[in-house]
Image (spheres, rainbow, N blue to C red):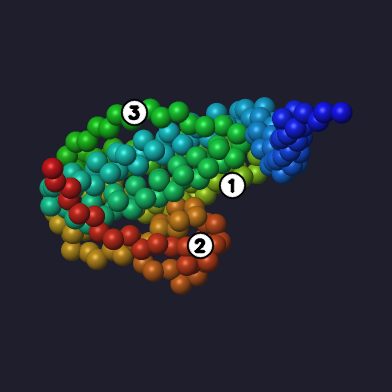
């Protein structure tokens, strides 16, 4: 009887490859199951909260639009030698950024994404920018977020409601700042602007909810109740030059 060693060797190799393949599949199976579960779960959330996702995207773009405008207003105020007003705009920009990031993360967790788009920014002189900021902030306080929270009710996603409440309360927290903005953007803008430039604000913003205070906090955040260690002191802005 003649043994075909070549054929036997090929069978051994095939057997080894088969065993290796089974071993590899047994190793990857839990990972594949997890990935499949994550995809399926995201699809389920996308189906479960379609209205919530659309509302969160609307809120995201509203906050990003405000952030980009405040960045532009900040640089304009610096260029016109109003460093304290520029500082105020930087604080508002930081708060809006936190709101937008909260929405972006939640949208991703709900199985959706945000498509990038260009945000047009219109910047005038500092007096006009202050007046525009006052109008836009009060619109969010009185109309935008009350409507958003009402529209979220049917699907009742707790995290979406909580984050929108954070945003609304932090905007309401700015009411004193808004009153000053309106005052500074009035007939006596220049003398009042000089007055604010003699002040020494020291702004801190909560990185959890966007809450803004004008001095170092000594207690947990009034809005999200997280420890005061989550407040970040904002440094004064520097004029960007080409």
Comes first in the chain, label 2 or label 3: 3
Identify the residue at image location x=66%, y=30%: 43
How packed is label 2: few (under 14 Cα within 10 Å), some, or many (20 or more)?
many
How packed is label 1: few (under 14 Cα within 10 Å), some, or many (20 or more)?
some
**In front here: 107 or 204?**
107
Give the x, y percent position of residue 19: 76, 38
Q: Which mark is residue 118?
A: 3
Residue 177: in sight, yes or no? yes
Comes first in the chain, label 3 or label 1: 3
Give the x, y percent position of residue 161: 60, 42
Identify the residue at image location x=75%, y=32%: 5
Comes first in the chain, label 2 or label 1: 1
Q: Which residue is mark 2?
A: 221
Q: Which residue is mark 1?
A: 162
Please indicate whether residue 193 sits to the left or right of residue 165 in the image. left
Comparing marks 2 and 3, which lies closer to the viewer?
3
Is 58 placed above or below 165 here?
above
Give the x, y percent position of residue 184: 23, 49
* Local secondary structure at mark 3: loop
Residue 151: in sight, yes or no? no
Q: Residue furthest front?
A: 1
Is 44 placed above or below 29 here?
above
* Local secondary structure at mark 1: helix
Comparing marks 3 and 1, which lies closer to the viewer?
3
Identify the residue at image location x=48%, y=67%: 228
What separation in Å lies between label 2 and label 1 (alpha carbons)? 15 Å
Please indicate whether residue 12 sits to the left or right of residue 237 in the image. right
**In front here: 195 or 220?**
220
**In front here: 42 or 180?**
42
């Amino acid at each position: 009887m003649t043994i075909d060693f070549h054929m036997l060797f090929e069978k051994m190799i095939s057997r080894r490859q088969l065993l290796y393949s089974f071993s590899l599949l047994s190793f990857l199976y839990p990972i594949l199951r997890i990935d499949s579960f994550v995809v399926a779960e995201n699809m389920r959330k996308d189906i479960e909260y379609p209205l919530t996702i659309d509302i969160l995207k609307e809120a995201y773009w509203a906050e990003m639009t405000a952030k980009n405008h405040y960045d532009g207003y900040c640089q304009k105020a610096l260029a016109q030698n109003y460093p304290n007003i520029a500082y105020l705009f930087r604080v508002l920009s930081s708060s809006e950024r936190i709101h937008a990031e909260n929405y972006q993360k939640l949208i991703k967790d709900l199985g959706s994404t945000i498509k990038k788009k260009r945000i047009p920014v219109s910047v005038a002189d500092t007096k006009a920018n202050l007046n525009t900021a006052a109008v836009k902030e009060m619109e969010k306080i009185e109309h935008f977020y009350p409507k958003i929270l009402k529209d979220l009710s049917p699907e009742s996603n707790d995290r979406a409601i909580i984050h929108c409440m954070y945003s609304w309360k932090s905007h309401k927290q700015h009411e004193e700042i808004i009153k000053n903005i309106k005052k500074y953007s009035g007939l006596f803008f220049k003398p009042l602007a000089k007055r604010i430039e003699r002040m020494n604000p020291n702004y801190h913003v909560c990185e959890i909810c966007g809450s803004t205070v004008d001095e170092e906090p000594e207690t947990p955040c009034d809005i999200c109740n997280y420890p005061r260690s989550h407040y970040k002191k904002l440094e004064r802005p520097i004029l960007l030059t080409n």
